[in-house]
């Protein structure tokens, strides 16, 4: 069974451990992982539930993934938007609907926060097709590309 809940301080060490796996899989793995920075970030999310949404995805009562998103206002108006910051599912749980469940819950949270639109900006390490399929099932459309240059 797939379930979800908001994360709390008891999840911080697990998220840090999971984020190390995420980091090792990422295109940023050559950089330096900063555990203290991550810990402070997670605690800030927990302390600011009207701005940040931190979720734990569960599969058969086991933590299987985490999701972080936020709500903000455009600089040119008071219109609110929501944006995904991090979504990660441990390799053993991929394909189990954990990611989709967390994405749906984030959409519900964003609506409750009065966001008018929502953005997912995945860094998929070359696996964008899988994310595209999930986003389309949620009724999302592609609106832009992201360009990057290593300096």
Image (cartoon, helix red, strand yellow):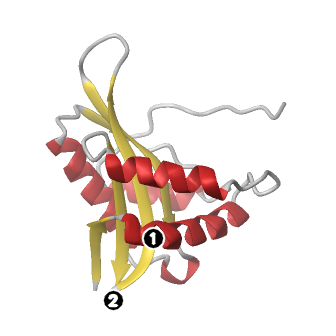
Left or right of residue 2, residue 84 in this image: right
Callout 2: 10 Å neighbours few (<14), some, many (20+)? few
- Name the element at disc 1: strand
Left or right of residue 144, residue 96 in this image: left
Is residue 70 at least partly visible in the picture? yes
Which residue is located at x 27 percent, y 68 percent?
Answer: 5
| Quadrant in the picture for residue 35 | bottom right
- Residue 28 x, y percent position in the rendering: 74, 51
Which residue is located at x 77 percent, y 31 percent?
Answer: 149
Residue lying furthest top in this view?
A: 76
- Name the element at disc 2: loop
Which residue is located at x 50 percent, y 73 percent?
Answer: 14
| Quadrant in the picture for residue 112 | top left
State how many labels appear. Answer: 2
Callout 1: 10 Å neighbours few (<14), some, many (20+)? many
Q: CA distance from mark 1 to mark 2?
A: 12 Å
- Give whichever of 121, 9 is nearer the camera: 9
**Up/down of 114 relative to 63, above or below:** above
Residue topped by disc 2: 60
Is residue 89 at least partly visible in the picture? no
**Up/down of 146 relative to 87, above or below:** above
Residue topped by disc 1: 65
| Quarter of the figure that contains the N terminus | bottom left
The mark nearer the N terminus, 1 or 2, is 2
| Quarter of the figure that contains the C terminus | top right
- Residue 75 x, y percent position in the rendering: 37, 14
- Give whichever of 55, 135 is nearer the camera: 55
Left or right of residue 79, residue 11 in this image: right
- Residue 124 x, y percent position in the rendering: 60, 55
- Residue 142 x, y percent position in the rendering: 44, 39
């Amino acid at each position: 069974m797939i379930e979800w809940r908001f994360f709390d301080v008891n999840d911080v060490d697990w998220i840090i451990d999971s984020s190390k796996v995420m980091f090792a899989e990422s295109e940023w793995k050559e950089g330096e992982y900063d555990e203290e920075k991550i810990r402070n970030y997670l605690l800030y999310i927990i302390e600011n539930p009207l701005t940040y949404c931190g979720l734990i995805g569960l599969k058969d009562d086991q933590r299987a993934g985490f999701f972080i998103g936020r709500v903000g206002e455009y600089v040119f108006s008071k219109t609110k938007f929501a944006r995904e910051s991090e979504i990660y599912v441990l390799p053993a749980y991929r394909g189990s609907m954990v990611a989709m469940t967390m994405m749906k819950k984030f959409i519900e949270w964003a609506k409750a926060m009065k966001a008018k639109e929502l953005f997912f900006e995945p860094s998929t390490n070359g696996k964008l097709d899988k994310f595209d399929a999930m986003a389309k099932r949620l009724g999302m459309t592609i609106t832009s590309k992201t360009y990057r240059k290593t300096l």
